[in-house]
Image (spheres, rainbow, N blue to C red):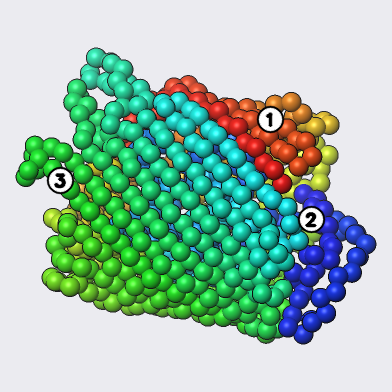
């Protein structure tokens, strides 16, 4: 596609300032235009990279975080339904804990279970959402960001630029089916050339008492989910200080709280559930970048994270009639990254991360488990006009301990990775890519110590992942304005694979499979057609085929079966008609059958499904005032389906969103 880049004094000052440039006098330069073809990052990346920015998500009719995740290939989502249902992801057959989540440049962590609940993060505040399988082409990153088989990268809306002194305000209200309402507010301003800030707040209430169909042989009844109410809130304060044109200090203060009732698994004619879950999370992080030393740049990060969880279940089967579990996690984290660019084509980085985690709980076989983690990454990158090659060596050191009891074993390992992207023809945006990555994951505290479920003898999970792919981008046609196609095939060899089998919304059972393998293919396509003045047709789709199989011994009943909750086929698609009146988006997601256990017994089969939705949206603009109106109908055909066995997903629903922006 043709991208128009307007270059002026402000942009040049931000990128060209150095310690030697002491003259800060402003000069008005005549604006000029440069027309060039911009290659999307996912096309030229040496490892599979899929990105949804805010504009693309709007065009595709993405309604929430779970919907956004369905639009990325190779992802398996465990979703317990409704606005308050826990949502975790795994990628290409890797366990959930093998998928890292990076929030504004810093990795999130959960030493208790390793499962990052993505329902905590609102899509309203997200500027872009990316999935990288393997290593990122961006080598100026932390060691922890490289310590996962795949990474979900969440980037929130940035603070205003230093040359923008205006207020930027967003106020939004969303109401929807089943007693859902969700107000959202964001405001940001540059107070001086050196300092900008933004504050964000939102609240969500949902009854989640949606209907579902219960089948018992020939008897079919309509029931409602109960004990499903949720109240959650989230607030952030972000600041950016620019002491020089080539350095900046970013700070983030984040707080989240969610009090929800858990509906439990559906049992025939026994709808009673007395489970509840109360989550609180606070963290503060600082990121300082300095690019002012010629060929040498560096970055430092510090973060403190506190997370509290309380799970309660009232039932006569427990002593005293109550199960009361509480957990408090703490993490102190620091990272330093140095980058050296000896030539325009060669880059070298060294990153070292340190983290201390501990856990207080009443449910462990031990008392006060803790862990010291040291990660070091040495990365080299070579690039020229037709190729990009990146190599990395990651050293992982884990030191485990407890105040009372027997700790899990300590481990250390070197993990290499290599990726390359080639452009065979300079006049065509066609890229061939290949990558290899070895990665190592320690068992979480729950996996090692959880009462009656964890084991200190649980082995770490080690994987070798291989990928080859081709990408193609086209732009400039009169009817077909742009097209982006990607295709990848992969093979993953997994040793001591840790598989999570859900018992309910909160408790998981962990086991080692010893050996497993995954092989599959991911395909994506995005097409834009010009239909006439003001009319555009945008289509996007993705498809994944994957086989993930236990391979310990042919004598095992699970040998060569499909790993639990992993579909063989999955995909999503959307078709959007952008016009001067009301934009219309039709979208669909679906997957094939899955099984609730690795043995693939027919009684554990979870049926496949195809779910459709429609979005109507209109934007109104007047000077600096913008109003967006949007109506969503989800599960248009009222399809009955489950992503986790016995946890029915919502049927047909609706939401209306009004957004006011002043900028």
Q: Residues within 10 Å of mark 1 (few under 14, many from 20)?
A: some
User: Is label 2 in a helix, a strand or a loop?
Assistant: strand
Which mark is first along the chain, 3 or 2?
A: 2
- Does the CB distance between marks 1 and 3 fall below 8 Å? no
Q: Residue at x 54, y 65 (%)?
A: 251
Q: Position of residue 160 (x, y in %)?
A: 68, 57
Residue 530 visible from this viewpoint: yes
> Residue 47 is drawn in which quadrant?
bottom right
CA separation, marks 1 and 2?
29 Å
- Of marks 1 and 3, which one's residue comes earlier in the chain? 3
Residue 379: percent from the left, percent from the top?
54, 77
Work out whether residue 140 can be spotted: no
Residue at the left extreme of this rendering: 319
Q: Which residue is mark 1?
A: 618
The residue located at (61%, 59%) in the rendering is 197
Q: Position of 1 compared to 306: left or right?
A: right
Secondary structure beneath label 3: strand
Identify the residue at horizontal 74%, vertical 57% (top origin): 164
Identify the residue position indicated by label 2 in the image.
Answer: 37
**Local SS, label 1:** strand
CA separation, marks 1 and 3? 49 Å
Q: Which of the 4 image quadrants contains residue 644? A: top left
Does 210 sit left or right of 580 as displayed?
Answer: left
Task: Provide the residue designation for mark 3.
Answer: 323
Give how far across and how far down residue 662 sits, in percent.
Answer: 69, 43
Which label lies toward us, 2 or 3?
3
Asked if 196 appears above or below 317 in the picture, the reply is below
Residue toward you, 410 or 27:
27
Task: Find the distance from the CA under tag 2 to the CA under tag 3.
Answer: 61 Å
């Amino acid at each position: 596609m043709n991208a128009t880049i307007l270059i002026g004094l402000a942009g040049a000052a931000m990128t060209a300032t150095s310690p030697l440039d002491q003259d800060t006098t402003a000069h008005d330069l005549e604006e000029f235009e440069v027309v060039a073809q911009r290659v999307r990052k996912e096309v030229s990346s040496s490892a599979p990279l899929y990105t949804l920015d805010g504009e693309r998500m709007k065009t595709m009719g993405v309604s929430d975080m779970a919907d956004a995740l369905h639009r990325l290939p190779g992802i398996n989502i465990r979703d317990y339904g409704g606005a308050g249902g826990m949502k975790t992801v795994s990628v290409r057959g890797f366990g959930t804990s093998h998928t890292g989540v990076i929030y504004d440049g810093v990795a999130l962590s959960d030493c208790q279970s390793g499962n990052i609940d993505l329902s905590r993060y609102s899509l309203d505040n997200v500027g872009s959402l990316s999935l990288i399988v393997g290593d990122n082409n961006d080598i100026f990153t932390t060691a922890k960001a490289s310590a996962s088989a795949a990474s979900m990268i969440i980037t929130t809306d940035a603070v205003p630029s230093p040359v923008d002194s205006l207020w930027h305000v967003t106020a939004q209200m969303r109401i929807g089916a089943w007693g859902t309402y969700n107000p959202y507010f964001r405001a940001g301003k540059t107070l001086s050339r050196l300092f900008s800030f933004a504050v964000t707040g939102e609240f969500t209430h949902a009854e989640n008492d949606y209907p579902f169909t219960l089948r018992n042989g020939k008897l079919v009844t309509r029931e409602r989910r109960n004990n499903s109410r949720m109240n959650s809130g989230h607030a952030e304060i972000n600041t950016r200080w620019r002491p020089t044109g080539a350095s900046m200090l970013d700070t983030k203060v984040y707080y989240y709280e969610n009090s929800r009732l858990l509906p439990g698994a559906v049992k025939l004619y026994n709808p009673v559930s007395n489970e509840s879950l109360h989550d609180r999370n606070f963290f503060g992080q600082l990121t300082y970048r300095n690019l002012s030393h010629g060929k040498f740049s560096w970055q430092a990060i510090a973060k403190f994270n506190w997370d509290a969880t309380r799970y309660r279940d009232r039932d006569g089967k427990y002593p005293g009639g109550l199960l009361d579990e509480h957990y408090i996690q703490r993490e102190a984290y620091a990272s330093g990254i140095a980058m050296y660019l000896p030539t325009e084509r060669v880059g070298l980085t060294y990153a070292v991360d340190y983290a201390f985690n501990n856990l207080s709980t009443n449910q462990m076989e031990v008392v006060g488990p803790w862990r010291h983690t040291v990660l070091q990454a040495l990365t080299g990158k070579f690039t020229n006009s037709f190729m990009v090659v990146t190599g990395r060596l990651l050293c992982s050191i884990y030191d485990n301990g407890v105040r009372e009891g027997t700790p899990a074993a300590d481990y250390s390992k070197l993990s290499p990775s290599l990726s390359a992207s080639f452009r065979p023809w300079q006049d065509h945006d066609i890229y061939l890519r290949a990558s290899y990555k070895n990665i190592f994951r320690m068992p979480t505290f729950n996996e090692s110590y959880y009462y009656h479920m964890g084991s200190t003898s649980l082995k770490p999970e080690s994987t070798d992942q291989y990928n080859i792919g081709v990408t193609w981008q086209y732009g400039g046609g009169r009817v077909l304005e742009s097209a982006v196609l990607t295709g990848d095939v992969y093979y993953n060899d997994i040793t001591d694979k840790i598989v999570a089998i859900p018992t309910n919304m909160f408790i998981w059972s962990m086991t080692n499979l010893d050996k497993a393998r995954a092989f599959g293919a991911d395909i994506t396509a995005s097409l834009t057609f010009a239909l006439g003045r003001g009319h555009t047709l945008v289509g996007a789709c993705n498809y994944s085929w994957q086989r993930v199989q236990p391979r310990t011994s042919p004598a095992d009943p699970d040998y060569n079966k499909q790993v639990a909750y992993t579909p063989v086929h999955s995909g999503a698609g959307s078709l959007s008609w952008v016009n001067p009146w009301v934009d219309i988006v039709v979208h669909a997601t679906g997957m094939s059958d899955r099984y609730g256990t690795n043995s693939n017994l027919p009684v554990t089969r979870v049926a496949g499904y195809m779910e459709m939705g429609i979005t109507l949206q209109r934007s109104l603009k007047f000077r600096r005032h913008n109003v967006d109106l949007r109506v969503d109908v989800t599960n248009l055909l009222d399809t009955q389906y489950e992503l986790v066995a016995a946890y029915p997903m919502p049927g047909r629903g609706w939401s209306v969103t009004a957004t006011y922006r002043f900028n």
